[in-house]
Structure formats: structure tokens, C-alpha cells
Amino acid sequence: MSGGKILLVDDDEAIRTVVTEALRRDGHRVSSAANLAERAELLARFEPDVLITDVILPDGNGLDGVPDILAKHPGLPIIVLSAQNTLSTAVRATEQGAFEYLPKPFDLDELCRAVRDGLRRSRQAASADGRENDDNGGLPLIGRSPAMQDVYRTIARVVPNDLSVLILGESGTGKELVSKAIHDLGQRKARPFVAVNMAAIPRELIEAELFGHERGAFTGALNRSAGRFEQAAGGTLFLDEIGDMPMDAQTRLLRVLQSGEFTTVGGNRAIRADVRIIAATHKNLIELIAAGAFREDLYYRLNVIPITLPPLRQRGDDVGMLARHFLESAAAEGLPRKHLDASGSARLAAHDWPGNVRELENLMRRLAVLSRDDVITANLVDQQLDQWSEGREPEPADSRFADESLAMAVEQYLGRHFAEFGSALPPDGLYHRFADMVERPLLRATMSAVRGNQIKASKLLGINRNTLRKKLGDLNIDPAFGRHKG
């Protein structure tokens, strides 16, 4: 392919020099600008075949003028460079009509490849519709590592269409968060997002769960019930743990994807399946296909756009950013506010994280509850990680601190009230007076740490689940969040 005319806009002289040299070696003519004013002048005079522009420039935001540029130069491939490596930047660049988005620091070979692709498809680049999008920096996807930048760029490309998406990755990497981000940024965001976990539904109920059932369709079907496809009408249906779906249900799902219609269990009226399908699994579907446990034709129907989420151990500096986010979230829920220092952040980054983001979130919530210090250091992180890795239950509080605190409270109580009762104990006894002081915060902290999972909580506490349920009721604690209902 013959070279083209490239306009490079960046206020960093070193970047302009290096990129210009690389593009010239690739056979292109290059003109460069350092700000928006120079960019506007050169766009009119130089008439480039490809525009490469930074986002943050001395006289404004490089993305703001992209729709106007495309209105005057339809089909001009625009490659956006940015040090603001967030999902919102990637999505906004795509929505504004950018041909490609590359986070800084970028790879020169990748930039040259993007330029060649832009030249090859110069008249096929999508024009922007001029929509200004709100800042989506509040999305629950956090991280600026190169691995997450690849995820952001893929999300940005799939948002404008309705193609099926298959999200792959280890457990705890955030597959549902990605599916929700695709929905929330897409054309169906005003309609329902419905998530269903295939592994959590009994095999014999999966079809009724997905497609609904008519009254009398089976024993216990007393009324008609809408399935998840109907509930998600016009929106997105997220099929989590698709690798656990039984073969017979896979066959019916394939027919629905092929025909765009389904019938309820026991029904005979075809219903249009107006949903976007996003599926996810931590399993290797190719291996399941080879073992005869997953339909190959269904795999290709679902795997139109694959997104592979990186494990946390490959995300470098994202760990500290995520940890601070989880501490802030815990504080917003009413848990003690804690801060992570540099040593704690470094220790977290060095951990292998077999449980990925979910493990990190649980650890930070435990540290928020169990640490008596306001600052979380490497030593505090080590204590919790060591307890967990050795298979020991984490202590519900620093035992020495708990003993000292309770002893002090008892002494203060007796100092204030013992003379009132003489040698007699308080009417309700010391045990009852102080049991609530210990039991309520212990149960609340435990339920918060396990995110409302009563099975895990009962194991951690070493008590029967029925006993736990009764105590939660007696103490008026919401089991879902570990908060006092009042």
C-alpha cells in the first residue's frame, strides 16, 4: 500500500518527533500540530488521509471537535491517543466517530498498523452522529493496565450494535460488570438488563426459567409465568455460566437464536425474541465441545464478539486502584472508613489473587471491618492473607484489642453502677448486658464480609445456620447486608 498524508496532533514534542519518524519510515508524509488551533489550520491546508490526535491539548479537548471534523471530512479515519486510559474515554472516542483508540503509552508498531488500516478503509470509517455523551467515569469497571485497555476498546466497538458477545475469563474477573457496561452504554440501555446464572438453576427448570411456562404446563404450574426472554424484551439477556447449560436446553436456545422466536413451555404461540444476548463462562468451551458437553454450533452463535477478561494478577497497578475503590464503597455502606498506604498497595499488587477481583473486594471489606487502624499497611494485609491461605478462619476482630475493649467497658460499667447495686449484679446480669455489645457488631461484620451469604457466615462463626437466622432476626439485622434494619 502506498503511503498517505498523516496529520499528527500532540503537545508533547518528544512524541511528535518519535511518531513522525516512525510514520515516515513506513512511507507516509507527516505534518504535525501542537494544539487545536494548529490542527484546524492543517486540516484545511494539508487535507490529511488520516488524523492522529491527542485528547488533552493546551487549548481544549481533542475529542470535542471530532464530530465537526467528520462533518467536513466524511470518512476521515481519526486515531485517538490518550493518557486518560478509562473506559469512558474509549467509549466516548468511539461514539464521537473515532476509527481507533490507543491508550498511552502506545506501541509504535500498533500505531503504524492502525494508520495502515485507516488508509485501507478510509471511506468505510463510521461517521459520528454528534451525540455528546455524559461522562461515564462512574462505571464500575476500574483499571488502566494495558490488559484492561484492550477490554475497553472491544467494549467500545460492540456497544453500537446488537451482535452476540461471549465473555471469557476466570471466576471473579468481573464478567457481569462487563455485560452490564455493554448494556448501559448501548442502544438498549432504557430497556431491562436481565441476568440469569445457568449453574444456579435445576436442570429440569432451565427451559421454563428462560422461556416461561403456561398454566398447567407441569405439576405446580398454577399460573402463566413469563421467562427471562420475555422479561428482557427490548433489552439485554445475560446468560452467565453458559458452560453449565444442559445439552437439551442448549438445543432449544440455539433454535431461538437461529429463528429469533420462542414458545413458552406448554404454549404454542411464537413470541419474538427481541433481546441482545451476552453469554459468559469461566470454562473452556472448546474442551467442552471436544468432550461432547457443549454444542459447537451454539458456540459459534454466541462467540460473535469474544471478550477475554484478564486475571487480576496480570493487571499490575490496577490492584491498588481497585482496593481503594472497594474501601470507599465499604465506607459508603456504613463500614469503617480506612485508607490504603503505599506499603499496603505494594503488598496487594504482589499477591497472586487466585480469586481475582472478587477475592480482592472481600479482603478489603474484611480489612475495613477487622482492622483497628485507620491506615491499612502491608503488615495488616499480610495478616489477613496468611490466615486465609492457611485455611484458618479470619478472626472476627483483633483478639487482644477486643479483650482490652470489653474489659474496659466492663470496668467502666461497674465503676458507674456497682455502688448502686451494692454486692448484687445488675438486674439483667453482666452477660446479657454485654453480649449484645459483642454479638451484634460480630454478626453485622460477618454478614457484610460474606455479602449476605448465610451458609458462609454460619461456617465462619461456627454456628448452625438456623441458629444464625434466629440471631439475625432477634437482633433485627438485615442478612443481605449485615446492617441493622432500623
Image (cartoon, rainbow, N blue to C red):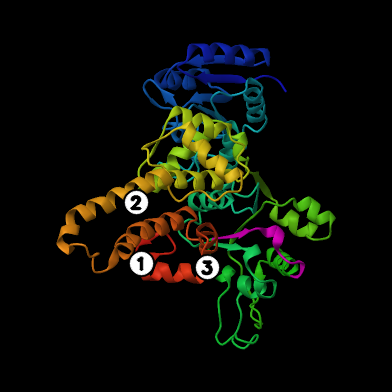
- Identify which amino acid the numbered label 3 is placed on: Asn
**Can residue 195 be seen in the rendering of this structure?**
yes
Occupied quadrant, residue 354: top right
Quadrant showing the C terminus: bottom left
Describe the element under mark 3 as helix, strand or loop: loop
Residues packed near mark 1 inside 10 Å, few (<14), some (14 to 19) or many (20 plus): some
Q: Which residue is mark 1?
A: 475
Left or right, 56 with reference to 107? left
* Residue shown at the point (50%, 59%) measured from the top left: 461
x, y percent for residue 404: 34, 45
Q: CA distance from mark 1 to mark 2?
A: 18 Å
x, y percent for residue 10: 48, 19
Q: Which residue is mark 2?
A: 334
Q: Which residue is mark 3?
A: 464
Quadrant showing the N terminus: top right
Describe the element under mark 2 as helix, strand or loop: loop
Q: Is residue 72 magenta?
A: no
Left or right, 405 with reference to 229? left
Please state which of residues 477 and 265 is positioned toward the viewer in this rendering.
Answer: 477
Q: Compared to 106, does 360 lie above or below?
A: below
Name the front one of labels 1 and 3.
3
x, y percent for residue 218: 65, 85
Q: Which residues are magenta?
A: 236-248
**Can residue 486 be seen in the rendering of this structure?**
no
Q: Disc 3, disc 2: CB below 8 Å?
A: no
Q: In terms of sequence position, does the residue under pointer 1 or pointer 3 come before the other?
A: 3
Q: Compared to 317, does 297 lie above or below?
A: below
Name the front one of labels 3 and 2.
3
In the rendered picture of this protein, how many numbered marks are placed on residues? 3
Q: In terms of sequence position, does the residue under pointer 3 or pointer 2 come before the other?
A: 2
Q: Disc 1, disc 2: CB below 8 Å?
A: no
- Identify which amino acid the numbered label 2 is placed on: Gly
